[in-house]
Image (cartoon, rainbow, N blue to C red):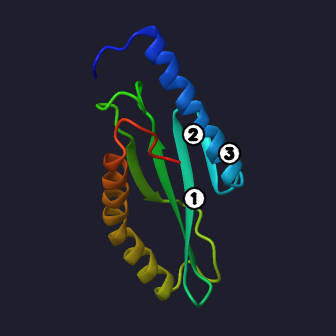
Amino acid sequence: MSSMSAEEEDEARERRLAEIEFVRSAYGEDEAWVVDEKLIYRRLLVSSSDGNVIDVLLSLTMPDGYPIDEEAILVIDARISDDAVGASSSSCTAKNMRKMVMDSLPSLIEACRLSALEYVGSESIF
C-alpha cells in the first residue's frame, strides 16, 4: 500500500465512516452490521419453496487507505452461517440445498470482488 499523508488518512477514514452510515441506514440490524469500523457483515437468506433457509454471511473488510488508495481494495468473503433456519434443516432437501449454496459461494465472492475492482479508488459499498 502506498504511503498516505495524515490528511489523506483522515479523508479515507471519513469516507469509510460514510459508507458505514449508509449500511446502517439502508439495512436492519439483523441484515447488516459493522465490527470495528472496518468490517461489514451482510446477511443473505437463501430460501427454498419448502421453507428451508440457508443463512449466508457476506463479509466486506475495508483496509487502511480504502477507498482513496487504489491498492486498498475491499476484502470480500462469504460463508454459510451455522444458524440454519427452516422447517427441517436436517432433511435431505436441506442438505442438498446447503451443498448447492456452498458450491455457489465462490461465484458470489468472485462477482463481489469484480464489482469492487470496478470501483477501485472510490466507494465500493454504496
**Within-10-Å neighbours for mark 1: few <14, some 14–19, many 20+:** many
Rate crowding at label 2 as few (under 14), some (14 to 19) or many (20 or more) other CA atoms within 10 Å: some
Report the mark closest to the observer, 2 or 3: 2
* Residue at 57%, 25% in the rendered image: 14
Distance Cα–Cα, label 2 vs label 1:
17 Å
Q: Helix, strand or loop at disc 1? A: strand
Q: Which badge, 3 or 1, comes first in the chain's sequence?
A: 3
Camera sees residue 37? no
Question: Which residue is label 3 attached to?
Answer: 24
Residue 51 x/y as whole percent:
62, 85
For disc 1, the marked residue is 43
Q: Are marks 2 and 3 in contact (CB under 8 Å)?
A: no
Circle on res. 19: 2
* Residue 59 relative to residue 35: left or right: left
Image quarter of residue 22: top right
Q: Quadrant of residue 3?
A: top left
Mark 2 or mark 1, which is nearer to you?
Answer: 2
Residue type at mark 1? Answer: Arg
The residue shown at (48%, 25%) is 12
Residue 98 numbered mark, or none: none
Amino acid type indicated by mark 3: Arg
Where does residue 8 sit, x and y in percent of width and height? 44, 17
Decide which of tag 2 and tag 3 comes sooner along the chain: 2
